[in-house]
Image (tube, grey):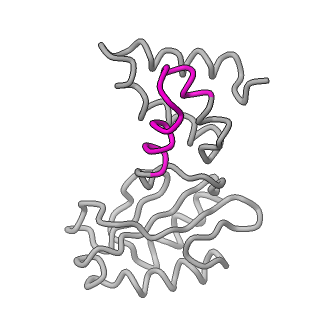
Amino acid sequence: MSAFTPEQEKVLQAWTERYPYPNMGLLEALRQVQEWHRCVTDEDEEYLAKLFEVPRSRIHEAATFFPSFTAKPTGRHRIGLCRGLSCCLAGSQEMCRCLEKKLGVREGETTADGKFSFETTECLGACDHGPALIVNDELQGRATEHLIGKLMGEMK
């Protein structure tokens, strides 16, 4: 039995047809799987390997290379805080402690209810917004206690 609904299978199939070479849609398909399952499982990798007609190792390489993809489920709201040099100098360590306190989990963990996961990231390329904060892959801007509190209220 597939880990995907028939509708989801159609979406994934479409990624093999969108570009001149089927492999070009692989990252978009992985993004979609991450969104649906909140991770990319071994079973997902097997399915995509068959769909894209590539060795599973190719899927696994992509799924483990990019930090956007995880092997274990993330929270419904995935919070990332940049730990690059500029953001570190702008106070990312203080904001890391703030997020850990507000979420009740340490960096790299998911809340018990599965609503939130928190991770630090490499440079987000948003040094002018340091310390940069992303939620579900969307840049939120400069992390402040006020912004973090506001976002937490909106996402609950």
Residue 3 percent location from the top left of the image: 72, 30
Q: Is residue 143 above or below residue 114?
A: below
Q: Residue at x 41, y 51 (%)?
A: 65
User: Where does the image place residue 89, in percent across and percent down from the top left?
Assistant: 26, 85
Seen in the picture, residue 135 relative to 18 is either above or below; the reply is below
- The magenta span reads 47-64
**Quadrant housing residue 22:** top left
- In the rendered view, does 125 fall on the left or right side of 80? left
The residue drawn where x is 49% and y is 39% is 57
Q: Is residue 80 above or below residue 33?
A: below
Q: Look at the image and say whether residue 10 sits in the magenta stretch.
A: no
Secondary structure, magenta segment, majority class: helix
Image quarter in which the N terminus is found:
top right
The residue most toward the right is: 1
Q: What residue sits 42% from the left and 87% below the top?
A: 94
Examine the structure image and report whether residue 59 is included in the region drawn in magenta: yes
Residue 54: give x, y in percent of width and height: 47, 25
Q: Position of residue 17 (x, y in %)?
A: 42, 12
Name above or below for residue 105 compared with residue 114: below
Q: Nearer the viewer, residue 145 or 55?
A: 55
Q: Hey, which residue is sitting farthest left in the picture?
A: 128
